[in-house]
Image: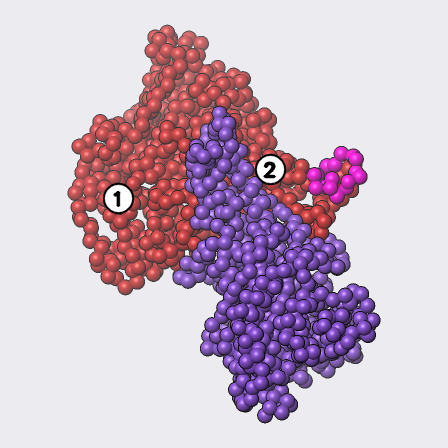
Chain colours: A purple, B red
Amino acid sequence: MIGKSVPRVDAYDKVTGRAKFTDDMILNKCLIAKVYHATIGNGVVRSIDTSEAEALDGVVKVVTFKDVPDHCYPTPGHPWSVELAHQDVADRNILTGRVRYYGDDIAAVVAEDEVTASRALRLIKVEYEEYPVEIHPRKSMRGSAHPIHLDKKDNILARSNYFIGNVDQGLRDSDIVIKRSYKTPIVQHCHIENPISYAYMENGRIVIVTSTQIPHIVRRVVGQALGIPWGRIRVIKPYIGGGFGNKQDVLYEPLNAFLTLQVGGRPVKLDVSREETFCNTRSRHAIEYDLTAGIDKEGRLIAKDMTAYSNQGAYASHGHAIAANGLTAWRLQYACPNIRGEAYTVYTNTPVAGAMRAYGIPQADFAIESFMDDIAAEIHMDPLEFRRKNLIQGYYEDAFLKPIAANTNGIFECLKKGADYIHWYEKRKKYENQTGDIRKGVGMALFSYKTGVWPISLEIAGARLALNQDGSMQLQLGATEIGQGADTVFCQMAAETLHMDVEDIHIQTVQDTDVSPFDTGAYGSRQSFVTGTAVKQCAQLMYEKILDYARTLLPREKRTLSLDHGWIYAEDTRVLSLEELALESYYSLTNSSAITAEVSTQVKRNTIATGCCFAEVEVDIRLGKIKILDIINVHDSGKLLNPQLARMQVHGGMSMGMGYGLSEQLLLDEKTGRLLNGTLLDYKLMTTMDTPDLTADFVELDDPMGPYGNKALGEPPAIPCAPAIRNAVFHATGVAFNENPLTPQRLIEGFKNAGLI
Amino acid sequence: MIGKSVPRVDAYDKVTGRAKFTDDMILNKCLIAKVYHATIGNGVVRSIDTSEAEALDGVVKVVTFKDVPDHCYPTPGHPWSVELAHQDVADRNILTGRVRYYGDDIAAVVAEDEVTASRALRLIKVEYEEYPVEIHPRKSMRGSAHPIHLDKKDNILARSNYFIGNVDQGLRDSDIVIKRSYKTPIVQHCHIENPISYAYMENGRIVIVTSTQIPHIVRRVVGQALGIPWGRIRVIKPYIGGGFGNKQDVLYEPLNAFLTLQVGGRPVKLDVSREETFCNTRSRHAIEYDLTAGIDKEGRLIAKDMTAYSNQGAYASHGHAIAANGLTAWRLQYACPNIRGEAYTVYTNTPVAGAMRAYGIPQADFAIESFMDDIAAEIHMDPLEFRRKNLIQGYYEDAFLKPIAANTNGIFECLKKGADYIHWYEKRKKYENQTGDIRKGVGMALFSYKTGVWPISLEIAGARLALNQDGSMQLQLGATEIGQGADTVFCQMAAETLHMDVEDIHIQTVQDTDVSPFDTGAYGSRQSFVTGTAVKQCAQLMYEKILDYARTLLPREKRTLSLDHGWIYAEDTRVLSLEELALESYYSLTNSSAITAEVSTQVKRNTIATGCCFAEVEVDIRLGKIKILDIINVHDSGKLLNPQLARMQVHGGMSMGMGYGLSEQLLLDEKTGRLLNGTLLDYKLMTTMDTPDLTADFVELDDPMGPYGNKALGEPPAIPCAPAIRNAVFHATGVAFNENPLTPQRLIEGFKNAGLI
């Protein structure tokens, strides 16, 4: 079953509209909640008057920052830890009177219907004391009279660094030293379904149905936010319309839980609008990089240095983990004896940055891979050859993250496939000396990516299987289907190990923390690797339990038993159907015991997926317009579990990567920090019209670490397209842009500066 | 925790209206289904025209008996068996063209709303060929030109008998032989919530949310009815508003499942009206008994003979199991060397009889206990003394149901308590020679009752526990809360064995066959006994797993560990809190594994609960009116799990028993079999105004069979009140009624015949 393009198990329901998302499950007579957002970018609420809102007919409750528990809680979807050092930064309350960005949450209204809730919001009167707004990390870290968070006087959330060898000495020993700075924009996930939840009480406990990637983590964070035992919270996750990391954060669930408590446990729905999703949920960190490299005459990296400044926005969320992940990437790709990395994550008065597909690597990769091309250009070397020369070869063991040890040779095969596809050498030569307004170029970029979060954080997954009366199987996981096809590959895994048909594995797609095995959820491209390990172990356990029971039914059978597609075999002979066995297990008057299997597994392994993008572009210099003529991603993600789904993942990631390279950015007002283009009309996502044909290819190196030879594939496709396009534009025009996206404005400005127009 | 009157875990939610029943969970845009019922009592549909109904705006689908799968299926909530002999009678389709009773299901309409569905029903045109109607079993078993079911020419669904000793010889050896006949009425459960369900499809499977006692059995029966693999069906059971056995039958779930299939998986709701609940669901079997007993001079039973004729109505449902259970009761109470029992269950053209609280024993007990008083009167013996003389003493082992072996001495203590309470001897004497229109009397009746269904059928139960991060526990069962308080006592059981507080056990009250452990559900007073055994085993397993994990955290601790109220103790010292242990199990970077425990247990034990009712009545002879002056039930149900809940069970059962004795009966038109009083206005349930103060008392003999010393208590309270009242009326007036209920009409007639008026 592994390696087959099995149709998605949820395909039919999603296409026909049968699939039930949070809003399809809302209870009748659900109250509606809406949030009152700050209209300044920095300051404090001096007074708030809710009396008119409360007097409005149909308003059930108005709460303000004065009503919420006064302790702080963390929001990121990390596994948590009993060790303080591994716990996330707790820096926010459910509502706040200390406004830290334009749009901060000050109050909330609960009303009988949506119109009344909206009207009530407009009746709330707030007076502020305003402070100056700072939206740039390098300026914010100089400190301010009113630190954004009191315990961080210099507004630095965190700083970290590492040293390998001696970078200063390495740079001195180099034949050439190159310095560049790069910058990436704030972008947003733009999942189809905005965050939405509803909450109510049952038997003294709070139930939250929410569009999340991480139900078990939501349970913990709501407990922390409200200061109540975690066992008193129940989180249910239906189908969700995408998350891309935004729903790997605990966004409005604590407020929703708090509100149902305020209205005697009545159901309260909190439906986050698209505009709120842009402004008040999470975005990808804008990061600025200062990079330095020392090269010898042969083009070998002798020393490399990275300093990163990450714009966290107003609250910690995933915080420094993002910039730190980029620092790690600085090591994982190119061999170099002397490496230094340093990163600052800085609070500013902007919307909050958090997790987004590939978690800091698209930023670092844009900088690193642009830098690699810039170095190659500087030393007049083919950028692909320069990379090949410097890539880590063979078996890699990371100095700081010991358990990460992997054969990274797959990248060389990826590069070969990509270069062949795009006719690299031919076109690099062909487009060398162009003139005129329309010029073509080819560019590429590569990446490497860890699989899951071990050893930086915990990896744990659970699985339960139950044999049905008809010989089919129920599969229950705490891991989540978030649109990526997880349910389908989990069914394939169970079918593979149990020697069954995929159609006979019925997966429980809704997670419910009261009954689903514990798993931290969908992020870090971890599930097929980590949860996959639990599924495999659970299926192996079930397989053994079935044969154990078969032996009780066949006491005289001395041959070796096995299970294959609905039959128990004694060596090569069918001796019992699985259905008969299952019926006996349920209904035998002498020997019945329904057969289930459950595991909870800590996975202490990791491995590295790699890949690359090759792009050919045509640049209209006077229009500032880039047309992508051809583009391919080639991935070494180990054995493909489902080639069709793998291709879909790559296509989606490429679309996100192209948007990152070409058009997507959230713009802020310098003075107030107010979001200027937080709507789908103004924020330029890639559309079908903008998107060329996408090609996805794979190198299927079997990896001994993954349960079925598989490695990370969910996030990586989003990484390399932006720098590949930037490098293609560089090839076409000779202009090295150091900031994405390559919008017409930026291109025109760059071409003007370069004297092309 | 066991033996404490812990408040119900669902009390707050049920009192405040928070608790969610099926109708509270209905999905938006649910289609509405309604059933077209036959308007003749016996015959066949010659033609059916649905064209006008189909043409009505808002009608989505009309189906008739011609559209449904043509194989038959069984409906009773029995565990099923792989052995054909243990399977229930499959004698019905989802819809039928062969009308077997007035109201039989011929067609169904699915519409956008309720009004349209009702209008569409009225547009369906049916032509019948009518056959003669027979509603009496003794007549029906003579056979008819058109047998109700083709394979039963004589309309006898089943017949069974047994012989112990030699009854004919025993009667010949007796000093006196007494014969009597008794008769019981059709009554209905009258649970507050009518049957209701909705069904839809997800991922190619059918989901049914339904008000049932037996979700796992509904799954099986729907699979059988539709002829699809059982694993493709998912049944969810929310809170339900009572069942009393009516929801131990698979009523309209197969039709509902079929209808969602007909409309492409859209949600379809099937809300059964009160009138339909009376006519088209199930009722208690009316049974007629011919009893004979031979007595020696000392008043000892030498021989006894029972022949029972049970009115099954039009379909098999639970069928002969009811009458057979009464036959068994004929053995379990009074010692006698020669016993014969014979029972016929007969199809008639009446609404279908099925399971109802105490499953055939209220009928048999009315006959037997009336008979005991009639014999005692005949031989001029005090009826209590007569019983004491003949009751089985000490340890009883049943001849036919070997595993039933129990100490039945509790009944003697019950009798003593009851007699003392009612001042038996004083009042029997005082009321001996009354005259005038107002007379008083005291009467009593006793019973014995098995606990669960082993060894007649399978007993299996499952349980799963999961340790939460806060040290609290999730408890999952396939057993169902149906209003009886099951969730509460299961929490007490788990708390008891885990040495925890009840508040720290969070029970999953909604059963979902996809995720709930397998259990056959609520019936036969089995759950506290059978499921309780699974809960105990599961809690013991969890206890051991917690200590095992504690040992990994305390490797140097050599003392014996134990768990008590949130702490791990090493001998008498607290060494670790359960919360710390739980957090480590979830989040330790070195040693994490979420702790769960699951068992599936076959229980091969049974035991006998006993009890009695003593009642004092005042009879107004000219008005035909009985006033209950005082009434007490005394039960030996072993150790009480929760005395408060136990009293509630007894009160509810006594109300049902008094209604059975005084006022409840479903009346049928002789000619058509049409139900004449199937509404809550015409059917006379006991109201608060009719009900005297109820007294419940207990004899708590610890029973080694039950997991916590407990025995059946759910059903027994409904058994003895009716015969106790009948016997009190006999004592008051000297008139021995042989049919219940003792309505004014029946009393007046009886008193007239006796010359009292």
Which residue is tagged 1?
B96
Identify the amino acid type marked 1: Thr
Residue B227 x %, y %: 34, 43
Location of residue A123 by image quarter: bottom right
Q: Quadrant of the C terminus of chain A?
A: bottom right
Residue at mark 2: B538
Residue B338 among magenta residues = no
Please tell me how crowded label 1 is: few (under 14), some (14-19), or many (20+) other residues with Cα within 10 Å.
Answer: many
- Is residue A157 depicted above or below A472 in this figure? below
Residue B17: x %, y % from top left: 51, 54
Whether labels 1 and 2 belong to a single chain: the reply is yes
Q: Is residue A410 visible?
A: yes
Structural distance between the alpha carbons of marks 1 and 2 = 45 Å
Q: Is residue A360 visible?
A: no
Magenta part of the chain: B547-564
Report the front residue among A651 and A751: A751
Q: Residue at x 62, y 46 (%)?
A: A600
Q: Residue furthest top?
A: B173
Q: Amino acid at mark 2?
A: Cys
Name the chain letter of the residue that bears numbered label 1: B
Toward the viewer: B299 or B187? B187
Q: Secondary structure at mark 1?
A: loop
Locate residue A667 relative to residue B367 in the image: left or right. right
A306 w.r.t. B78: above or below: below
Rendered location of residue B46, percent (x, y): 17, 46
Q: Image point 29% across, 60% down: which residue?
A: B59
The one of A586 and A9 positioned closer to us in this rendering = A9
Q: Give percent across and percent down for residue A134.
A: 71, 80
Query: Crowdedness of circle 2 by 10 Å Cα count: few (<14), some, many (20+)?
Result: many
Q: Is residue A675 above or below residue A699?
A: below
- Observer-nearest of A561 and A601: A561
Q: Chain of mark 2?
A: B
